[in-house]
Amino acid sequence: MSTEKNNYVDFHCHPAMKPFGKSFNYRKIGINHPRRNRSSSIWKYNPPSVLDKLINYVINLTKFSQANFTSLAKGGVKVACVSLYPIEKGFFVNKIKSEFIKDIASNFATGVGKKRVDVIQDITDYFKDLEMEYDFYEQLNNKVIKLPEGKFRYKLVKKFTEIEMANQDGVQTINVIMSIEGLHVLNSNINKPVNEIEFMANLQKIKLWKAPPLFVSVAHHFWNHLCGHSESFTKLVKKKVDQSEGINTGFTVLGKKVVNELLSTKNGKRIYIDVKHMSVASRQDFYNIIDTNPDYKNMPIIISHGAANGLKSFKNKTSGGSKVANLLKQVDINFFNEELIRVAKSKGIFGLQLDERRVASNKTIKHTKHAVKRSKIMHYRSELLWFQIQHIAEVLDNASLFIWDCIVLGTDYDGIIDPLNAFWTAEELPYLADFLERHAHNYINNNTFKISENNIDADEIIDRIMSSNGLQFLKTYFK
């Protein structure tokens, strides 16, 4: 399992989430330790134990590391779009009364450590936290690490040609592209009224980074004064954490200004917009912005980590478009058929996330077969993701579009997700590819697409999703 063999591209993961959090346990915080046995090292290998898996299976909490760079290396990831994410204070200012229980629950849910939770509970400056996490990646940038599988490193890259040049010295390289999840990061003082000048100044600082983000998501879990978000919590978290402020609203005047500054090429490199986590109203506003501005005529729609909801459109929320539409999770944070068509027409990307709570309905998951044998578990659980692929494929084929150039991987590993059972970490990605290929093979042996060019071999379908679609997108837009 090496990067040379698989060349996978993951458009959304959080390798630093846990080690950066654990660095707050030390006297010097924010240090990415070069010794990979330290909890604050981004190379710290921490595969899930049997108990970890049991806890995840029973109560859907994922405390183990999924996207540390050792796991990415073992899983054959060539390119990782790492998501910088200062954890929002709203997670820890919640309806749990006891401070002790609140801290323990938060620490347990995220695996970032109690001291990191304490900092977030008192945080006032998200931008400073963002800069610290960015620096965390820079510290071991291009440093060679010896693993049992060979010599590895990660490298912060600024353009696609750097990816093409990687590995020339025999060191297997994980090419790291920056992204940001949630533009609450522009807020330097969350206790004061919004300061537009400050927001714009911070945005400009981001554009001037040595390795600026390729894309950012404007919305995340809580109100950020820029645009409304979708409901994103389920079960226990939904009961304890209030994300009602600003939910399901559209863009503010300031939010539209921020979008235009991000997309501008007059103030530095264009930073693209990831529409994940936007409310339906915000997505409609954003699509209108790019539809009505000639400068954005060929703007790719980016969904870094998402799932289809099986519903036809914003105005027609009925199930349809594929044979499996009714098996999907029919919620607004997931994407409508009309949006899938928009992504394909824009030459954008749809990143398949591996969060079990998103990819299929509760009923579908409940009726998924259980097994003890690992290979059977992998077969049944990977089918949940295949339903997503099948739905997207049939929707696009029915719209007379080429299917197989916009679907990519966006795992959301280490983003506090409940992963598909048996595909716990990035290390299992080669197995995921194998099992998806089986489902693709079974499908194409029994079905024919209307558009002849959509009828390609199963191995090519999965290679495109796991690797070549992502590389082609980066070759076009990462310049």
Image (cartoon, rainbow, N blue to C red):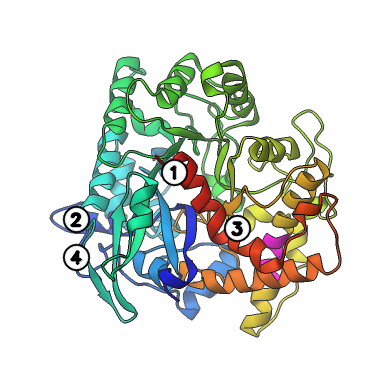
* Mark number displayed over residue 34: 4
**Mark 2 residue crowding within 10 angstroms, few (<14) / some (14–19) / many (20+):** many
- Picture coordinates of residue 103, whole percent (x, y): 37, 53
User: Viewer-nearest of labels 1 and 3?
Assistant: 3
Amino acid type at mark 3: Ile
Q: How many angstroms separate mark 3 from mark 2 (CA)?
A: 35 Å
Residues at marks 4 and 3, CA–CA distance in whole angstroms:
33 Å
The secondary structure type at the circle numbered 3 is helix
Name the mark nearer the viewer: 1 or 2.
2
Determine if the magenta segment contains residue 32: no
- Between tags 4 and 1, which lies in front? 4
Q: Earlier in the sequence, mark 4 or mark 3?
A: 4
Does label 4 or label 1 sit earlier along the sequence?
A: 4
Does residue 205 lie above or below 195 as drawn?
A: below
Q: Earlier in the sequence, mark 1 or mark 2?
A: 2
Packing grade of label 3 (10 A; few <14, some 14-19, many >=20) is many
Which of the labelled discs sits on residue 91, or is there none? 1
Label 4: which secondary element: loop
Residue behind mark 3: 465
Please report the residue visible at 65 percent of the width from the left and 49 percent of the height from the top. 307
Q: Nearer the viewer, mark 4 or mark 3?
A: 3
Dividing the picture into quarters, in which one does residue 91 lie?
Answer: top left
The earlier-in-sequence mark between 1 and 3 is 1
